[in-house]
Image (cartoon, rainbow, N blue to C red):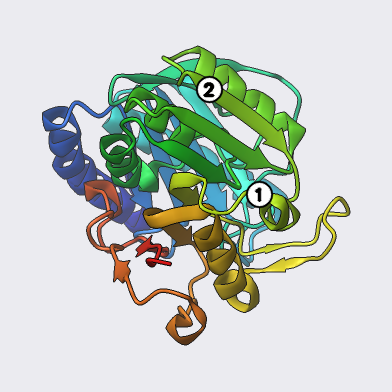
Amino acid sequence: MSDPKLMMFHNRLTKVYRHLSKQARRQQITCWRVYDHDLPEFPFCIEIYEDKVYLAEYQRRHGMTEEEHQAWLESCVPTITGILGIPDERIYFRERRRKAGRQGQYGKLASEQEFFIAKEAGLSFRINLTDYLDTGLFLDHRITRSMVREEAKDKRVLNLFCYTGSFSVYAAAGGAARVDSVDLSRTYLSWAEENMKLNTAAPQTNFIHADVKQWLDEAPAGYYDLAVMDPPTFSNSKRMKDFLDIQRDHSELINQVLRVLRPGGVLYFSTNYRKFQLDKDKIETPAIKDITGATTPFDFQGKLFRYCFRITAPDR
């Protein structure tokens, strides 16, 4: 290996893989993040899903021609496969823009429909590494999902902006009496339903196609015991009545959820907006706990750009 920069990447990836793989084995975790732009010269996100690797290159101004860039990428792949011990045919490559939050990640890139099943905490999830920028399972919320599972027993659970329904699956596995999942995308609601079918469903499991903001206006007050809301940073879907800006709209959204929770009910609220500031003065409860640190998994330490809060509905 004559390229000193490539040697630097080799050494860094070797170090982090050895360290993190031990923790993954110890915790019996088979889906985890190995590397995330640790070195500016190698702007990759590398994740392992069972025996496969998701390799994403963040878009940047690298100054190379298309041929030079392809040659550079091809020089990096043997280093990655060699260290991870996973052959080339199990590497799934994507180029992606680094977003300020989870915006635009749901866009479809291809239509190969190559799904496989991955396990997390004894539960099964359909993963797709070919058709979308994201895989169907946000690994950074591994701990948050476990918290929801632990609290869900005999409760009515609401999962808003549910994406592929991983929180819903965890709630059902925790013994929830009812799980309602709301999203504006029929594609992801269908994916969520398939994930639920792979696991033990709650006695009542509903997948609701709706604009979350409008749906909350009509939802019954005081009905739910536990809610999860992990919205996009920004959305201007034509199917929405109004566009969503999470910094501008979060207090209104949170108050809408507090209205549909029983007194003492809990909302787990998360956002990936890096510059997010929680407007506590506008939120209609003083019981707000920042659990960002407590919900940060071992493979995201020091690299997680999201916030997570546990918010309790007030007595009425």
The residue pinned by badge 1 equals: 219
Where does the image place residue 195, in percent across and percent down from the top left?
52, 21
Residue marked by disc 2: 204
Horizontal side of 111 relative to 152 (left or right) equals right
Comes first in the chain, label 1 or label 2: 2
For mark 1, does the 10 Å Cα neighbourhood hold few (<14), some (14 to 19), or many (20 or more) residues? some
Please identify the quadrant where the C terminus is shown. bottom left
Q: Quadrant of residue 181?
A: top right
Q: Position of residue 3 (x, y in %)?
A: 37, 52
- Quarter where residue 188 is shown: top right
Position of the N terminus, as image quadrant, is: top left
Residue drawn at the location 48% of the way across and 45% of the way down: 224
What amino acid is labelled 2 in the image? Gln
Residue 281 place in picture, x, y as percent: 46, 86
Mark 1 element type: loop
Q: Which mark is residue 114?
A: none
Answer with left or right where residue 104 lies relative to residue 71. Answer: right
Count every numbered label the image shows and give the total.
2
Q: Position of residue 22 (x, y in %)?
A: 13, 35
Is any atom of residue 188 visible in this view?
A: no
